[in-house]
Amino acid sequence: MGAGDKGDGETIGRDEEVLRAICDVSNEGIMIHDGGVILSCNAALGVMFGYEPESLKGRSVLELAAPDYQDFVRANYESKLPLTYLVWGTRSNGTRFRAEIRARTLSAPSGELRVAVIRDLSGSDAAAGERATTVSLLRATLDSTTDGILVVDIAGLVTLYNERFLKLWKIPIDKMAAATDVDAMKFVAQQLIDPASFFSRVSALYHAPETESIDTLEFTDGRLVERYSRPQRIGDRIIGRVWSFRDVTAQRRAEHTLELAVQMRDEFLGIASHELFTPITSLAVAIRGLRDSTDATTDEALRTRLFRNAERQVARLARLVQELLDVTRIDGGRMGLIIDDVDLCEVARDVLERFAPELQRDQIEAHLSADQPVVGRWDRTRLEQVATNLVGNAIKFGRGRPIHLTVSLVDGRGELAVRDQGIGIAHDQQTLIFERFQRAVSSRHFAGLGLGLYITRQIVESHGGTLRLQSVEGEGSSFTVRLPMCVPGEVRP
Ligand code: ADP
């Protein structure tokens, strides 16, 4: 630069070498002009505008400004005020770029000179743009994640959080403004079952900033939230801590349900194999007996007994397999009904007749009260199955005491009640036993798959009816089926 030629001779002359060096290493463009005529400039200015610095000497500063900014630039230097302002510059190849100008006027013996320092903002614009894009991406990511996020700096001040975080902890937005982690924690701790362990965990983590942690918080409203925490770093330096919170209530419940289902399936397989195996064993014994009794010496009565037993075991096997098939059909929504005119009294009578040998053998009294025919549009086979299940259970759990069946018309509905005076059902089991595979008794004492009542209820409900239980443990049970006179949706012919 040749500013020393015209400037304050004493200062510039003394430090000219130093100043020249400073100007040469500067990234910013530096120029001295006199009324808009460039006297001197540094290398950075030449690079910025795309000229050889020497070639700029004697040219007008206005040539470096975009045409629409030239009047503005002229007005600024003519004002002689110290100014900092933004303009659009023009490079030698015609491209425009954003520039910041800082200028002031110096008084020199030969007149007034203007010194201008020019900074190319195009690079920093791009960087700022990039930063803005990154920030907006981060914001969008934070707001779209299903996790609640909280970032706290090393001093405990909240630096960032997302909407999900506020929702999860039910924090009103005004509570978060200028909040510290302590404020936030006080607000949230009251929602936890065990706030003390929450606080001690947090304080342990603040004393060990390096540590990552994961644990589960139990909320008083039943929610389970997984809390994950790790330090926030820049390079190796820890500058804060990131907390993320995930509501895992549904997931944990599903896992629990799945565990129960697997456990139930295993139990069921155990019971089912036992249940199927018992009649097979009896059947094998009966067949062996029959094979050994082919000679003429064998008592005819014994042969008849063996036959009857074999038949009973086959019937039992068929019933078990039928139950399994029914459950599969119900689960697949394939239990179609074959509707016809059916008298509920006849159904009850037929079923009791079928149980006659068993009732006789165990000397159990069975009474049927049916004053008048109760005819509805129902599926006869399915209703026989309902009555069979209920009477079968009354015999099985009835301790040999009398059984009562009642068929009647109540409020325009057909009703079948089966009452026994047996072991009864504990109150807390009374809903459960209608579920699949659920039993209120040990399989060691009573045979069964725990499917009969489930199937019974499905049949009754598919007729639009209800199945009600009244029972006192140790005193007996009464199951009541109520059916509308025709299946909903079925039009009477
Ligand atoms: P299961 O084939 O095991 O009898 P059910 O579905 O018919 O299956 O019955 C489920 C459970 O309900 C039985 O295991 C028993 O604990 C209880 N239960 C059903 N009927 C009676 C009854 N009349 N008296 C006492 N308990 C009963």
Image (cartoon, rainbow, N blue to C red):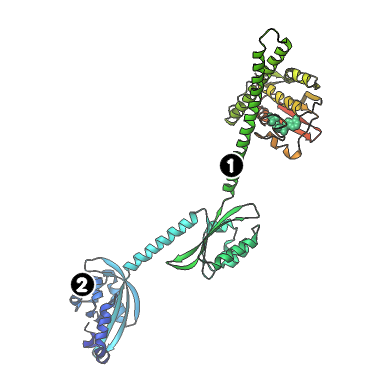
**Residue 103 occupies which quadrant of the picture?**
bottom left
Asked whether residue 100 is in view, the answer is yes
Question: What element does badge 2 sit on?
Answer: loop
Circle 1 residue: 258
Which quarter of the rendering shows the C terminus?
A: top right
Which quarter of the rendering shows the N terminus?
A: bottom left
Q: Residue at x 70, y 32 (%)?
A: 444
Circle 2 residue: 51
Q: Residue at x 22, y 80 (%)?
A: 40
Above or below residue 196? Residue 108 is below
Q: In terms of depth relative to the viewer, which is nearer, 386 or 1?
A: 386
**Residue 170 occupies which quadrant of the picture?**
bottom right
Q: In terms of depth relative to the viewer, which is nearer, 383 or 163?
A: 383
Asked whether residue 345 is in view, the answer is no
**Residue 404 occupies which quadrant of the picture?**
top right
Q: Residue at x 33, y 70 (%)?
A: 121
Above or below residue 242? Residue 329 is above
Instruction: Dividing the image into four quarters, tell me where ligand 1 lies.
Output: top right
Amino acid, disc 2: Tyr
Residue 130 rendering spot, x and y as whole percentages: 37, 62
